[in-house]
Every structure is written in structure tokens, then in C-alpha cells.
Image (tube, helix red, strand yellow):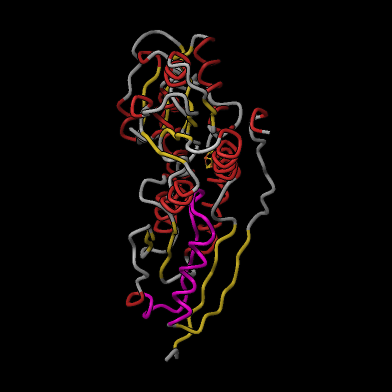
Amino acid sequence: MKNKNLKILLASPRGFCAGVDRAIEIVKKSIDKYGAPVYVRHEIVHNKHVVDSLKKIGAIFVEELEEIKDKTRPVIFSAHGVPKSVPKEASNLNMTYVDATCPLVSKVHREAENLYKNGSHILLIGHKNHPEVVGTMGQLPSDCIDLIENVNDAEKYSKKNGSKLAYITQTTLSVDDTRDIINVLKNKFPEIKEPKKEDICYATTNRQSAVKKIAKKCDMFFVIGSRNSSNSVRLVEVAKKNGCDKSELIHSESKVPIDKITNCKTIGISSGASAPEILVEEFIQELKKQFILEIEEVEIIKEDITFKIPGKLN
Ligand code: SF4
């Protein structure tokens, strides 16, 4: 029998961003246009629920083009972006491809190219092996771009030659941690060029600000999202650093931790940019079975950004 009250603070904005919406739409429209199956290189966005639902309508997920058995079928590149070698390889194989790279990631790619053309050596602030970082590094010759993962890397970095330095960043980093890294770089290299417009995207920034706003009022904080979703993992860190030590990621294999929640008066909930709202709803439904809920949505900003899908799919 339910006899315990539980207050939920729901962070807003949360969940899908414009880049994720667009990437999923691109897969659906490609299946409409070309028929099934269509191949998708890498998870279109980092969420098992999304990937499974697209598999059901005819998407086949691969990590590399060489895994594609029928090269007459189209291939879609994921929202995280790809190194330049990938569309080149697809063209060499005479494959039809559709690029679902988020326009805000493409913006970082063009920025890297322009800075490089103007004679700068590039420092990319980001996480090693994340597909977005692999894609961005793959826009330039490998000896023209170095990865900086943390403050320690920034402190240790020494210029390799006399060229000018510029930095760019992954779009889904912690806003606060990145500021610390940038401050170290600017102190060491006062002449370092910075992006014209912030690379960390609006969706990452807004979701982190929304979590910051409520974290300290919560006994526990839950972020719905995948373990390989950079922005979801960052939201857990942001909640921890901003007043809620007990913050956890709820991923596809997680159980709702009722035992822990029983000791809470207030919990916070958010979700990463690749997590569909249905997963938040299911989490709350599970809680409803055990608690008398009071739900308060705390919205810090309204988002109305949308991105067009490629014209060839219309
Ligand atoms: S998190 Fe940002 S960069 Fe990534 S897909 Fe969404 S809008 Fe684009």
C-alpha cells in the first residue's frame, strides 16, 4: 500500500534536442524513401530504446562500412559526425549516403578546417574515443590537431612548433569543467584563438543549467540516459557537483532503485539529449506504484530550435 509522499522535481529542458530529433527523422525518412533495410553507421544517437525502435522498422546498425553486406543499400552517418575518410570511402564504394551529423557538430568541423587553413594548430577539448571526437579529429591531418581531455593535459601541453594555437571543443562537455580547461590554456597561451561562438551546444548547456537549478534541493538525482551518452553522464556529474551527491544514471539495464528512494523526501529527474521522454514517463510510473507523488516541473528556458532534414529526403 502506498503511504509515503515523494516530491519529484523534473528538470526542464531535458531529453531530446533538435540534433537528435533530426537524426531519428532522417533514418525514418530514408526508410520511407529507399525502403528497408537502410544501414546506419554507429548508433544514430546513443540510446538503446531509439536504436531498437529503428531496427524494428528496417534500420541495420554497423560500426564500419566494410560490415555492410549489400553495398547497394543506403547508409546513414550518425548524429555524432564522421571523419572525412568515411564519406570518401562511401563514394569510393559507390554507396548512397545520408549524413545525419548534427548541424552544431558540423559547425565545429568547419571551424576546425577554417582555423587550420589560417595556419593554426588545433587543440580539441573532448573525450578520447567518443565518436564525435573521432569525427572532429578526422577533419584534419592527424599532426595538426591534439586532444586535451582535462586540466592536467592542458597544464602539460607544450607547443610542438612555432604555429599559432586555437582551441575548439566537443559539443557535449561539462560547461564548468571545460571553462577550467580553457582558463589553463589561456593562461599558458594568451594568444590562443577561441571559437567565434561557443562549441558546447545549447542543448547541453540548457540541460546542465536546469539540473544545477534543482540539484541542491534533492536527496537523490536520477538522469535517464545511456552509459555511452556523453551528455547524460555529464548531467550526473553536474548534479553531484552542484549539491546532490547521490546522483545516478538510469540506463537500459537499471532497475528503479526503490530501496534508496524510500529514504528520500525529494528527488530530481532529468534525461540526456538522446533519451526519449517515454523512458522518463516509465520511471515515474514505477515510482507511482510505491509512492504518493507530487511532481513539479522546473523550467529554466523554453527551447524552440529545430533543424531541417536534408533536401534529398523530402
Ligand atoms: S546534443 Fe547538441 S550537438 Fe549533440 S545532437 Fe543535440 S543539439 Fe546537436
Which residue is at a point 52% across and 80% down the rendered structure image?
A: 293
Give the total of numbered labels: 0
**Res 197 quadrant in image:** top right
Q: Position of residue 284 (x, y in %)?
A: 49, 71
Q: Is residue 220 above or below residue 160?
A: below
Q: Position of residue 290 (x, y in %)?
A: 42, 82
Residue 266 colored in magenta in the image: yes
Which residue is at a point 55% across and 61% down the rendered structure image?
A: 11
**Res 67 quadrant in image:** top left
Residue 9 colored in magenta in the image: no
Of residues 7 and 251, the one nearer the viewer is: 251
Viewer can see residue 171: yes
Of residues 100 and 166, the one nearer the viewer is: 100
Q: Is residue 8 above or below residue 65?
A: below
Q: Is residue 75 above or below residue 293?
A: above
Of residues 108 and 99, the one nearer the viewer is: 99
Q: Is residue 172 above or below residue 129?
A: below
Q: Which residues are magenta?
A: 261-289
**Res 182 quadrant in image:** top left
Q: Position of residue 47 (x, y in %)?
A: 43, 49
**Quadrant of picture, ligand 1:** top right
Which residue is at a point 40% across and 8% down the rendered structure image?
A: 162
The quarter of the picture where the N terminus appears is bottom left
Q: Position of residue 246 (x, y in %)?
A: 36, 65
- Image-based side of 289 in relation to 128, left or right: right
The quarter of the picture where the C terminus appears is top right
Viewer can see residue 183: no
- Image-based side of 133 in relation to 104, left or right: left
Which residue is at a point 61% across and 43% down the rendered structure image?
A: 18
